[in-house]
Amino acid sequence: MSQPEQKEFIHPKGYLSVAKNVGIKDETLDLTVIYSEKRANAAAMFTRSRFPGAPVIVGREHVADGFAQAVVVNSKNANVAMGRPGIDDAREMCRLVAGELGIAERDVLPFSTGVIGRPLPMEKIRAGLKGIRGELEPNGLELAARAIMTTDRWPKFISRRVGNAVIAGIAKGVGMIEPNMATMLVYLMTDAELPANSLKPMLKRVVDRTFNSMSIDTDTSTSDTVVLMANSLAGAVDAAEFERALLDVSEHLAREIARNGEGATKLITVEVSGAKDDAQAKRVAKAVVNSPLVKTAVYGCDPNWGRVIAAIGKCFDDTDIEPAKTTIRFGDAEVFEHGAPVDCDLEALRAYLGKDEVTIGVDLGIANGAARVWGCDLTEEYIKENAYYTT
Amino acid sequence: MSQPEQKEFIHPKGYLSVAKNVGIKDETLDLTVIYSEKRANAAAMFTRSRFPGAPVIVGREHVADGFAQAVVVNSKNANVAMGRPGIDDAREMCRLVAGELGIAERDVLPFSTGVIGRPLPMEKIRAGLKGIRGELEPNGLELAARAIMTTDRWPKFISRRVGNAVIAGIAKGVGMIEPNMATMLVYLMTDAELPANSLKPMLKRVVDRTFNSMSIDTDTSTSDTVVLMANSLAGAVDAAEFERALLDVSEHLAREIARNGEGATKLITVEVSGAKDDAQAKRVAKAVVNSPLVKTAVYGCDPNWGRVIAAIGKCFDDTDIEPAKTTIRFGDAEVFEHGAPVDCDLEALRAYLGKDEVTIGVDLGIANGAARVWGCDLTEEYIKENAYYTT
C-alpha cells in the first residue's frame, strides 16, 4: 500500500508547532510540540491498558480540568514500564515546555511512542526543547504528523471546514502496540468555540465509532491516546455539524491507520447489520475483522466464507445468533444465506478480494443493531516486521 | 518441528478399528471407525461455536444418554454450514455404521473435519462403510490417528496404564479451524470401569486444564470435540489415579496439538501465578499466549518483554493487576519486577528463546490463583498455509 492522495490541508487558527530531530534513535524527526495561542478546552481518551505508559498517567492528570494549551510528543521511545523515573521524565517534559512557552505545567500533555522498557534520553529531549518558543511556526501540522511516526509508512492528516471554523487531525499508529513502536496517537485540533462540557461526551461518541472500531492485531497499546483541543478563535459553530465533521475526520484517520497496518496490503471493512443491538453488531464485526484466518484468506484472495462463519460462531454468548437467520456478503455478492451456501461465481469473488479495499457484510437477521469496523489483512510482512525487529 | 519420539502404544481392551481411503479428496486415509465390543459409558465436550457443524448437532443428541459404542470420522470435509442436508448426511453415517455393526444408531457418534461449505460425498462414504464389520482390527488406533489428520504433520497418540486398565488417546488439529481443515478432534478410550455419572464432570475438569488451555490462533472451530469412552472390560480402577492419568494423556495431546500448530516452530507455555483466582490466571495466560506480537517475538528470538507487559495490560477489567506487583520471567530469568525492568543478559535470553520449547512466567502478586496454557509461535509459514490454500 502506498500513501493515498492528500487533499489540501487547512490549518485551524492559533495552532503553532515545531517538529525536529533530537537524535533519540536516528536522524528522522522525533520530537514535536503543538501549541495553542489561546488556552483550549480539551478532552482526551486514553488506553484501557492495565500497564499504561508514564505519559498516559501524567496526561490523565493534566487533562482532568478540561483544559490544555500544548502537547509534546517524542517518538522512538515509549517511556513505558520504567517505574517512578518514567513518571518523573514525563513530568519534566511538561515542565520544560511550560517554562519555554510561559504557560501552566498542567496545560501541557506529554506523549511518548516507541520501544518499551528503556529510559528516555532526557538530555537529548532537554536540549531539543530549549528555545522552542522561537521555533514555533504556523502551518506546521503536516511536519508534526511526520514527527510522531514510528514505522508508519506515510503521515496521516486531514482537515475539514465547519462554518467559519476548521477541524484538523493528525495521527500515527501501525500496530496497536510497540514494536514496531506502534502506539496509536491522534490529535484533533479546532478553532471552533464549543461548550466545554460537550467536548468529552462528543469525543467519546466519535471515538467509539472510529478509533475504537478499528483493529490491526488485537494488541492494545500501553499508550494509545486521542486528544481533542478547541481554542474558540473562530467563534461558535453548529454543534451537530461540528460532530459530523469530527466523525468524518476521525473516520478518515482510523481508516488510514488500518490501511497502513504493519505489513498490510488491504483495508478490510466489516459491516454488521440485523443485530440485537449495536454492541452485539460490534462484537461480531470485531470477531470477523480480528480472525487471523479471515485476514489471511483476504490476503490470499481466497473467497473462503467458511472462515467468516467460524469467526461469527466464536461469539459464544450471543445465543440469539443462528445460522438459519444469517447472511454473509463479500462486497455485493451473497455467499451464505438462511443457513446454507449460495451458489456463486468464485472467479468474480477472487477478483473482488484482489482489490485494495474489501468489505465483508454480515446480516444477523435478529433486529436493527449495526456496526462498521476496519482492519487489514495479515501477511508475511507483519511477521517479518515483528519477528526480526530486535530490541 | 518434527514428530517427537513416541513411546510404545498400548491398546485398551475391546476397541477395534478400521482406517481407510475412500477418495474424499486425495489418496490419504480419510475414513475411520472405532468400535467398542462392549457398549461404553461415554461423555463428550463440544465446540461452543454458534455455527456448529452437523456432526456436532447429531453427536450432542447421541451422547446425551451417556452411552456410545462407535465413532465414525471422515477427514477432508467438515460437513459445516450445509443446512438440513448436512444433518441428514451425519445421521446417515451413523445409521450405516449401526447397520453394519448391529448396534443402535444413537450409540454411534459422527465426526467430519475438513473444508466448510461443501456437501459430503456420501456415495464414497457409503461405499467405504460397506462391509466394515469384517475389516475391524484390534491394535489399529495408530492408523485411526492417521486417518483423522488433515494438515497435521504427524499423528498424535498416547496411552497410559491405570491399575489393570489402559487409557488411550488420539487427536488431530493444527489450527482451531478449517482451513487448513483444522478442527480439533480428540478420542479418549479406556477399558476401565468407571461410575457412569463420574465421566462428564471428570472430562470437564480435565479438558479445562488441557484442551481448553491451548490456543493456536484464537479461531475456535465449528467442530471441536473431545470424547471419552469407558467400556469396563478391565474392571474397576482407583478414580483419582484414573483422573491423574487422563490428565496426563490429555496434557500430552494438547501439547502435541500446540507444537504442531500451523507453521509453528516452537511450543510456548505460559505459566501465571499469584492471581486473584485460577480464572484470572487463565485470562492473563491466554492474553499472553494469543498475542500476535508475543508470538512473533518468540519466533524471532527477540527477548522483548515489553510485548508481554502490553498483553497482560489488555485484561482491562482486572483492575487489581498492577505493574508494581507483577514479575515476568523468560524461563528462569526475571526480566521485569516491581514495575521496572531487571538488568539481564540479552544474549542468554536470545539463546533461550531459540529453543524448541519456551516458557514465559508471570506472577501477578495478588493471591494464589494459577494457570498454565500452551500455544505456539506465529510464522510466515502460518500465513502461507492459510493465505494460499484455495477452496
Image (tube, coloured by chain):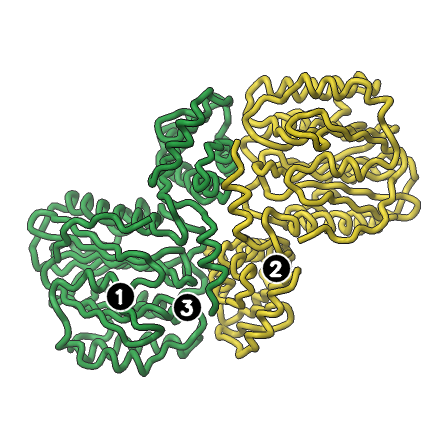
Chain colours: A yellow, B green
Spatial CA distance of label 2 from label 1 is 37 Å
Secondary structure type for disc 2: strand
Q: Is the residue A76 above or below the residue B378 in the image?
A: above
Specify whether residue B117 is in view: yes
Q: Is the residue A62 above or below the residue B29 in the image?
A: above
**Numbered badge on residue A270:** 2
Question: In this figure, which residue is indicated by the disc labeled 1?
Answer: B147
Task: Say whether marks 2 and 1 touch (CB < 8 Å).
Answer: no
Subunit under mark 1: B
Question: In this figure, which residue is indicated by the disc labeled 3?
Answer: B115
Spatial CA distance of label 1 from label 3 is 16 Å
- Residue type at mark 3? Val
Q: Nearer the viewer, mark 2 or mark 1?
A: 1
Spatial CA distance of label 2 from label 3 is 23 Å
- Residue type at mark 2? Val
Q: Which residue shows up at 53% across the image and 77% down it?
A: A342
Q: Residues within 10 Å of mark 1 (few under 14, many from 20)?
A: many
Q: Is the residue B83 above or below the residue A52 in the image?
A: below
Secondary structure type for disc 1: helix
The answer to whether marks 2 and 3 sit on the same chain is no
